[in-house]
């Protein structure tokens, strides 16, 4: 279905861990649509992950960076502009991690050091990415910067724990920095709120299979897959969405505006 929507565009893709990652599927789509990019992930994930496989498939350079480190981000943006041969048109922040979720800490007994880590990795890192992009003057006008989020920023999901707060921070940063970057450089900043998706980060949430099935039943179109999300990201990186900024874009098959579905009614009938 390639339409050359991103021909000549350059960017950075964060967060491809394995072939299930939303960032992995996005990298393949962006490549198919004519874009070129560098791939980055936390140094620790790169040793475990299969990012090299993806890099060779896409002809992309890998530049390790911990998204919480300003020094790493500075080096990443500068090196990306250098290897890609010019300023950037798109950036995907596809990063999430909570030590409290990982270690199954109940919400009433959180470790606050870990809480701060969750906020830093999954929320504040987006500000660091945006600020670094500005300070290194790495973005072209009308560039598009996206982060991925989840509806737990607006509604409570018991097992999502402190990730819910991180996603609220993330979405708020997109609005505040989106305003600033639009005025400065006409750069667009948005978040995409994605359906539950079977990836490493997704499966880390306990009870994931149940809320995956529940969301699927509550969405008239069903859950959006990682591949659907990659297609939407391509659209948001393309010139066809150039006046969209400071938005939290629901990409969820209709979940967020559905009260109940016939399928659930049938299921709940005694
Ligand atoms: N899977 C879902 O159900 C779902 C739903 C909505 C939104 N999202 C969001 O989509 C994004 C991508 O997640 P995914 O589902 O593809 O899972 P994933 O586990 O494949 O990706 C998460 C990535 O974050 C990276 N990461 C963690 N700490 C980092 C750090 N300090 N620096 C740089 N990178 C770091 C990991 O290495 C990994 O590549 C996340 O923001 C996630 O919250 C996921």
Image: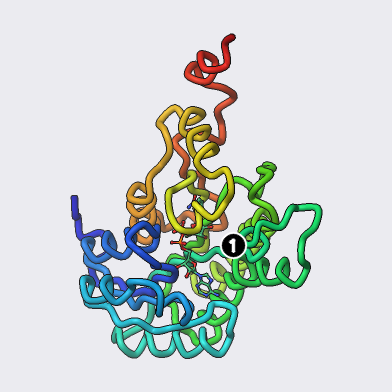
Relative image position of residue 213 (x, y in whole percent): 48, 34
Q: Residue at x 48, y 85 (%)?
A: 137
Looking at the picture, tell me which residue is in the foreground, 77 or 143. Answer: 77
Looking at the picture, tell me which residue is in the foreground, 159 or 152. Answer: 159
Q: Residue at x 42, y 73 (%)?
A: 141
Query: Does residue 114 appear left or right of residue 144 in this picture?
Result: right
Could you tell me if residue 176 is visible in this image? Answer: no
* Quadrant of the rendered image containing residue 142: bottom left
* Quadrant of the rendered image containing residue 207: top right
- Up-down: is 136 above or below 57? below
Query: Does residue 70 appear left or right of residue 251 in this picture?
Result: right
- Rendered-image quadrant of the C terminus: top right
Could you tell me if residue 86 is visible in this image? Answer: yes
Relative image position of residue 252 (x, y in whole percent): 47, 40
Relative image position of residue 187 (x, y in whole percent): 48, 68
Relative image position of residue 211 (x, y in whole percent): 54, 38
- Up-down: is 94 above or below 68? above
Q: Which residue is mark 1?
A: 174
Query: Does residue 67 appear left or right of residue 110 in this picture?
Result: left
Mark 1 is surrounded, within 10 Å at the Cα level, by few (under 14), some (14 to 19) or many (20 or more) other residues, namely many
């Amino acid at each position: 279905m390639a339409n050359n929507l991103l021909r000549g565009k350059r960017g950075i893709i964060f967060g491809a861990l394995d072939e299930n990652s939303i960032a992995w599927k996005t990298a393949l789509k962006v490549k198919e649509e004519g874009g070129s990019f560098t791939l980055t992930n936390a140094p620790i994930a790169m040793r475990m992950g299969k990012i090299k496989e993806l890099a060779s498939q896409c002809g992309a350079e890998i530049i390790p960076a911990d998204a919480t480190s300003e020094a790493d981000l500075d080096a990443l943006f500068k090196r990306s502009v250098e290897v890609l041969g010019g300023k950037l048109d798109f950036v995907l922040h596809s990063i999430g991690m909570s030590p409290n979720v990982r270690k199954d800490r109940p919400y009433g007994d959180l470790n606050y050091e870990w809480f701060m880590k969750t906020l830093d990795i999954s929320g504040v890192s987006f500000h660091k990415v945006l600020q670094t992009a500005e300070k290194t003057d790495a973005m072209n006008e009308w560039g598009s910067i996206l982060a991925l989020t989840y509806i737990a920023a607006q509604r409570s999901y018991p097992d999502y724990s402190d990730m819910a707060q991180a996603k609220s921070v993330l979405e708020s940063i997109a609005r505040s920095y989106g305003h600033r970057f639009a005025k400065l450089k006409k750069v667009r900043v948005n978040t995409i709120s994605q359906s539950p998706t079977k990836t490493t980060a997704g499966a880390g949430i306990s009870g994931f299979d149940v809320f995956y099935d529940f969301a699927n039943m509550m969405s008239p179109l069903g859950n959006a897959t990682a591949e659907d999300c990659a297609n939407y990201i391509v659209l948001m990186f393309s010139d066809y969405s150039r006046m969209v900024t400071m938005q939290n874009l629901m990409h969820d098959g209709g979940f967020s505006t559905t009260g109940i579905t016939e399928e659930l009614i049938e299921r709940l009938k005694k």
